[in-house]
């Protein structure tokens, strides 16, 4: 009975309009290299525009599938694509032509919806990586703020304000 319910849900998701739109975005951005071309827009604007197209996968994972691990894994790919695209001297732009974040995200979504165990393991691994990165990032911000406060107090004590 559970398997029939899963099959119906899987069929409903795969026939949804948003699922077809994700496949179209993946085809346009990665198969026709639109992601790489958009990445050529200077000052990181092209990479931000490309990231906006990746939000369709994030929305689908978070709202339709309601999976935090899949959402984190998709965000991991999207953010990695942005960071790689920001590498200066057009190196990031060249990488954008070969790094297929939209294809990876579509494979993760498709495999997750179909219940592919290897994809689910990959999703969980990427979700853990994303979680660790978020914790490290937040700790870095706290450490930076603490250092800034300590430095400010030290400078003020040198001047005689404290």
Image: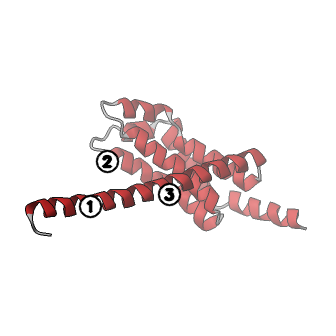
Instruction: Tell me the distance, in whole angstroms, between the alpha carbons under discs 2 and 3.
Output: 27 Å
Compared with 26, 138 (above or below) is: below
The quarter of the rendered structure image containing the C terminus is bottom left
Q: Residue at x 37, y 50 (%)?
A: 48
Of badges 2 and 1, nearer the viewer stands 1
- Report whether residue 20 is seen: yes
Of badges 3 and 1, nearer the viewer stands 1
Q: Residue at x 9, y 65 (%)?
A: 160
Compared with 36, 20 (above or below) is: below
Tell which circle, 2 or 3, labels the residue nearer the N-terminal end: 2
**Which disc, if any, is residue 150?**
1
Location of mark 3 (residue): 135
Pointer 2 with pointer 1, Cβ within 8 A: no
**Which disc, if any, is residue 45?**
2
SS of the residue under disc 1: helix
Q: Position of residue 130 (x, y in %)?
A: 55, 52
């Amino acid at each position: 009975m559970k398997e029939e319910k899963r099959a119906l849900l899987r069929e409903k998701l795969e026939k949804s309009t948003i699922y077809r739109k994700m496949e179209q975005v993946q085809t346009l951005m990665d198969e026709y290299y639109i992601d790489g071309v958009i990445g050529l827009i200077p000052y990181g604007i092209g990479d931000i525009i490309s990231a906006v197209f990746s939000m369709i996968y994030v929305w689908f994972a978070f709202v339709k599938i309601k999976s935090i691990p899949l959402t984190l894994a998709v965000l991991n790919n999207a953010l990695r694509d942005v960071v790689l695209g920001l590498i200066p001297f057009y190196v990031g732009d060249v990488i954008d032509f070969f790094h297929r974040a939209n294809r990876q995200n579509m494979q993760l979504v498709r495999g997750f919806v179909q219940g592919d165990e290897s994809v689910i393991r990959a999703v969980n691994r990427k979700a853990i990586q994303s979680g660790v990165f978020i914790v490290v990032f937040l700790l870095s911000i706290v450490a930076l703020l603490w250092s800034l406060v300590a430095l400010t107090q030290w400078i003020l004590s040198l001047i005689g304000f404290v």
